[in-house]
Image (cartoon, grey):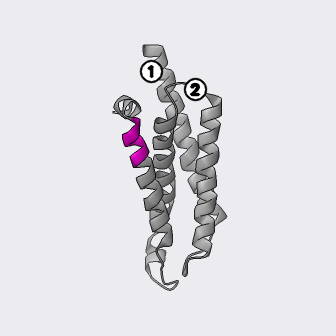
Amino acid sequence: MISWLEKNKWISWIITFVILGVIFYASSLTFKPSEEIFKKMTLTPVLYHLLSFFMLSLFFFISSVDRKWDFRKINLVLIIVGMYAILDELHQFFVPGRFASVNDFFLDFGGIVFASLLYFIMITWKKNNL
């Protein structure tokens, strides 16, 4: 599937931009501070941050890196997605009922790092098996 997405980069770019939009939309949602949902949702926000930035990073890698471990492209992807994570937290600062969190940024960054490691393993595996 990833090979197919690498060959059809326009689909990968569309998915990347959809994920960007979903993250922005989710950050725009407001919550009442006193809602009970926050007391019950301890693992859900952690998974949201890890998975959303994992998927964003993975599709960004698939869209922009051509099956090679090009450090310039990899670093550019890491910088762009990392900056988006910072901007996402700053955006939440201005949304009523939301707040910016350094912990959330580190969760986002964890998803970014995990995606880059997985993509590196996939590139290395493909290179050795071809």
Q: Going from the N terminus, do you reach mark 2 or mark 1 first?
A: 2
Q: Which residue is mark 1?
A: 126
Position above or below: 128 against 73: above
Instruction: Indicate the quadrant containing the N terminus: top left, top right, bottom left or bottom right.
Output: top left
The quarter of the picture where residue 59 lies is top left
The residue drawn where x is 51% and y is 36% is 64
Position above or below: 119 against 97: above
* Residue 4: % across, % down: 34, 31
* Residue 69: % across, % down: 58, 26
Residues marked 2 and 1 touching at CB (< 8 Å): no
Secondary structure, mark 1, is helix
Judge whether residue 10 is colored magenta: yes
Q: Is residue 27 among the parts visible in the rendering? A: yes
Which residue occupies the foreground of this view, 105 or 94?
Answer: 94
Q: What amino acid is labelled 1 in the image?
A: Lys
* Residue 63: % across, % down: 47, 38
Q: Which residue is mark 2?
A: 69
Secondary structure, mark 2, is loop
User: What segment is highlighted magenta in the picture?
Assistant: 9-14
The residue drawn where x is 59% and y is 42% is 77
Q: Is residue 44 left or right of residue 94?
A: left
